[in-house]
Image (cartoon, coloured by chain):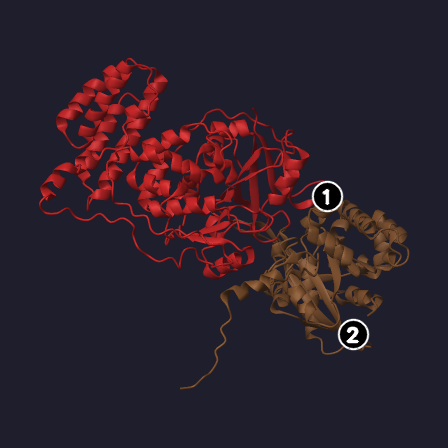
Chain colours: A red, B brown
């Protein structure tokens, strides 16, 4: 199926002057074109913090398609007035195409940018051409979630999920790069629900554009003005509210804290036609057992606070500020009689393994699965700095890739790269200082794995 | 020990205020008492609150034109000039928000540049609520004048109900000032004529064919940037007939109570190449001409 496109910007055309839908591909319906013009951002619509990076926006269209757009400050205003021209390239995406990219607008736009279809035209053609976008993406972007967990921590990410589930329009503040946490947010929902999450990472609020989640201005006065005008609930990522321990929010918090990404990815990848945001809390209760039976490498360091719902702005401009503090779970130190047993039972740092690549790859035979499992152990030992493991890896890897097709080799390399990063991050969180020897070991392993490229 | 009573309002009573809806002054849509903007048309609710405190309801005047025709500069300059006059027509702003447009325009011109483009989103528009005193009239008139974006006006004309605030305002206004870019018309650009024709058709459809009162609504057609074509100042009606015949004919047929004017603000302009922003037109000097006359004529046509 083809992706239609349209450009909304300021120009002098034969039809009218100023901000308008300057060009569109033939498949954009009249109804969708009017909706795009209605949502289109005009002069000075970008937040000051987003002028350089632009804004990624996503919302539904009347025809059932979705609009994933990128807004940039590009070029001069045609009328000779000050201020950059706001240029928005809109992709009108059929549901089937978006589903191939796991209903993730960020991955879709990345693919479009990589195929050079997402560009700023110096001379805007009157008629654009629809295009086909090849590729697909996985249900969950591991690396992004790992990095966001490391930067923000599990609490703010789970709070962001809670804001989305709550159904109120939310303004998010407290992070200099909102597009990153919006991109992470998408990965924390089942694929079927993602199309309900309209958002903009860098546009100013306007009632013309009722996005469910927007980034707020960093300047306090402007932020207060937007919140009071728009009756937004505010989520401050640098000071997230206390989170409930139940429901989808509680589940996400557990997953992020306990690094149960493998199960989470498996769960999110399962098809659930017709699933809505309102169905997530019951779904979380159904899935709880699956996460409970999963043995995570490091458990017990999460605390879920007493439940405090995310308030609307009519109640309070800040979310969760009145909630009493008090953990429900606290890990007490073992009695000294059992301390020795506890030390033996606790997994040592070196055994805190991330989800192994053999569990992620789509391997058709048990023999291949066994060989990859063996390779997982060798790779992990090599990452820990064991020289003999590195030697074994240098022998095992070339033998293995001779049996695999090119696609599986690339996929395997990708998984082991992820594995190396996960192991590095897991170790970095537990240690006081980052060991350069570990970094060198990781580079040695990757050199072996990517040697013939 | 004293026995003084202490009255503490219940927290729940504070929510009782939300049960009383406040209608928007423009579209009359219901809103909560603390809403800053109307949730239907995005007009400021301060207009409704201010109007509720006055005995005489404010009248509305629409100033419309295509994008870049000079609405912001005209309104800002008009309010600035009238607010400084000691006799004759005098204007007094109501509410701090009514001074923003004047401030932005005068500040921009003082820095040798034109004001920035007006965003198309109605919640970004500047509104002026003012009291105007005319010589010979005992009572002042309360007026509401918004600075609407040209793109929005054009979108509403082409697809009615796209911008409810424009439609509601145009229905209720007692007079209209239409701005036409004289410089572009003089250069042979017919888009301004076509825009004016579309606008006049839209207004006449909106007002209907009621001969009893609607067509008597005064219509001032003002050629802006007339400093770039002096013949416009000499005979605005003749300029319209010669350069914009479609609009001229429309006015004759459908708006008997109309008049043509010419106005200019910048005595001369130049183009400056600004890094990262392209070519920018800047005013070399400020010489307002013909700013007050259209407004004064319009007020004289009104009865209050």
Q: Is residue B144 above or below residue B193?
A: below
Query: Residue A77: image x %, image y %?
Result: 60, 48
The quarter in which the C terminus of chain A is drawn is top left
Q: Residue at x 38, y 52 (%)?
A: A240
- Same subunit, labels 2 and 1: the answer reads yes
> Which of A40 and B40 lies nearest the eye of the viewer?
B40
Task: Bin the neighbour count of mark 2 within 10 Å (Cα to Cα): few under 14, some 14-19, many 20 and up.
Answer: some
Q: Which residue is mark 2?
A: B134
SS at badge 1: loop
Q: CA distance from mark 2 to mark 1?
A: 38 Å
- Taking the image as drawn, is residue A91 in sight? no
Question: Which mark is in front, 2 or 1?
Answer: 1
Q: Mark 2 belongs to which subunit?
A: B
The quarter in which the N terminus of chain A is drawn is top right
SS at badge 2: loop
Q: Mark 1 belongs to which subunit?
A: B
Left or right: A53 as drawn, with respect to A87: left
> Looking at the image, is mark 2 or mark 1 earlier in the sequence?
2
Query: Residue B278: image x %, image y %?
Result: 57, 48
- Taking the image as drawn, is residue B278 in sight? yes
Look at the numbered discs 2 and 1 and tell me whether their residues touch, using CB distance below 8 Å: no
Left or right: A105 as drawn, with respect to B65: left
Left or right: A313 as drawn, with respect to B101: left
> Which of A30 and A74 lies nearest the eye of the viewer?
A30
Query: Residue A34: image x %, image y %?
Result: 66, 40
Residue A422, disc: none
Q: Which residue is mark 1?
A: B159
> Hey, which residue is sitting farthest bottom in the picture?
B1
> Which of B281 and A125 lies nearest the eye of the viewer?
A125
Query: Residue B198: image x %, image y %?
Result: 79, 46
Q: Is residue A272 above or below residue B187?
A: above
Task: Bin the neighbour count of mark 1 within 10 Å (Cα to Cα): few under 14, some 14-19, many 20 and up.
Answer: few
């Amino acid at each position: 199926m083809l992706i239609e496109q349209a450009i909304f910007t300021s120009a002098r055309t034969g039809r009218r002057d100023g901000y308008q839908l300057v060009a569109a591909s033939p498949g954009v319906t009249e109804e969708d074109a009017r909706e795009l013009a209605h949502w289109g951002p005009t002069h000075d619509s970008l937040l000051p913090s987003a002028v350089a990076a632009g804004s990624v926006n996503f919302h539904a269209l009347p025809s059932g398609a979705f609009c994933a757009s990128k807004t940039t400050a590009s070029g001069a205003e045609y009328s000779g007035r000050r201020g950059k021209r706001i240029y928005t390239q809109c992709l009108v995406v059929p549901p089937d195409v978006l589903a191939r990219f796991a209903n993730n607008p960020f991955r879709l736009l990345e693919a479009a940018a990589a195929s050079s279809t997402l560009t700023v035209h110096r001379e805007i053609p009157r008629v654009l051409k629809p295009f086909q976008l090849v590729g697909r993406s996985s249900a969950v972007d591991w690396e992004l979630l790992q990095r966001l967990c490391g930067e923000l921590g599990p609490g703010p990410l789970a709070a962001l999920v809670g804001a989305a589930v709550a159904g109120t329009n939310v303004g998010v503040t407290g992070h200099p790069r909102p597009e990153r946490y919006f991109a992470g947010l998408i990965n924390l929902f089942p694929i079927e629900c993602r199309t309900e999450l309209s958002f903009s990472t860098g546009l100013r609020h306007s009632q013309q554009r009722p996005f469910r989640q927007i980034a707020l201005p960093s300047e306090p006065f402007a932020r207060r003005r937007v919140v009071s005008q728009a009756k937004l609930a505010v989520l401050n990522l640098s000071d997230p509210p206390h989170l409930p321990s139940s429901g989808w929010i509680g589940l996400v918090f557990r997953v992020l804290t306990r690094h149960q990404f493998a199960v989470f990815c498996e769960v999110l990848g399962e098809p659930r036609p017709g699933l809505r945001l309102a169905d997530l809390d019951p779904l979380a209760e159904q899935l709880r057992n699956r996460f409970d039976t999963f043995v995570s490498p490091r458990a017990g360091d999460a605390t879920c606070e007493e439940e405090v719902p995310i308030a609307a702005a009519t109640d309070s401009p800040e979310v969760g500020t009145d909630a009493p503090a008090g953990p429900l779970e606290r890990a007490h130190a073992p009695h000294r009689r059992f301390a020795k047993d506890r030390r033996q039972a606790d997994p040592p740092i070196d055994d805190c393994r991330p989800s192994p690549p053999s569990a992620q790859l789509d391997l058709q035979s048990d023999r291949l699965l066994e060989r990859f499992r063996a390779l997982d152990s060798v790779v992990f030992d090599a990452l820990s700095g064991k020289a003999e493991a590195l030697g074994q890896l240098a022998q095992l890897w070339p033998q293995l890739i001779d049996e695999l097709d090119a696609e599986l080799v690339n996929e395997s390399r990708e998984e082991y790269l992820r594995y190396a990063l996960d192991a590095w991050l897991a170790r970095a969180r537990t240690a006081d200082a980052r060991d350069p020897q570990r970094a060198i070991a990781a580079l040695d392993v990757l050199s072996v794995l990517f040697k013939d490229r | 020990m004293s026995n003084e009573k202490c009255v503490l309002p219940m927290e729940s009573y504070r929510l009782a205020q939300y049960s009383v809806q406040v209608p928007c002054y423009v579209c009359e849509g219901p809103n909560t008492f603390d809403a800053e903007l109307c949730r239907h048309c995005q007009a400021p609710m301060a207009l409704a609150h201010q109007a509720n405190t006055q005995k005489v309801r404010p009248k509305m005047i629409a100033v419309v034109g295509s994008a870049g025709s000079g609405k912001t500069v005209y309104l800002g300059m008009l309010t600035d000039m009238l607010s400084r006059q000691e006799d004759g027509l005098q204007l007094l702003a109501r509410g701090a928000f009514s001074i923003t447009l004047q401030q932005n325009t005068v500040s921009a011109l003082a820095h040798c540049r034109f004001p920035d483009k007006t965003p198309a989103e109605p919640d970004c528009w500047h509104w002026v609520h003012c009291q105007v005193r005319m010589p010979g009239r005992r009572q002042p008139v309360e007026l509401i004048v918004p600075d609407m974006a040209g793109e929005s006006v054009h979108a509403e004309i082409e697809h009615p109900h796209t911008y409810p605030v424009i439609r509601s305002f145009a229905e209720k206004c007692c007079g209209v000032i239409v701005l036409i870019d004289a410089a572009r018309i003089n250069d042979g650009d017919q888009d301004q004529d076509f825009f004016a024709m579309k606008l006049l058709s839209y207004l006449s459809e909106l007002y209907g064919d009621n001969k009893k009162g609607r067509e008597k609504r005064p219509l001032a057609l003002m050629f802006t940037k007339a400093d770039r074509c002096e013949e416009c100042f000499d005979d605005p009606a003749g300029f319209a007939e010669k350069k914009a015949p479609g609009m001229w004919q429309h006015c004759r047929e459908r708006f008997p109570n109309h008049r043509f004017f010419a106005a200019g603000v910048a005595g001369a302009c130049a183009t400056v190449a600004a890094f990262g922003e392209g070519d920018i037109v800047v005013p070399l000097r400020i010489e307002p001409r013909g700013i007050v006359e259209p407004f004064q004529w319009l007020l004289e046509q009104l009865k209050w």
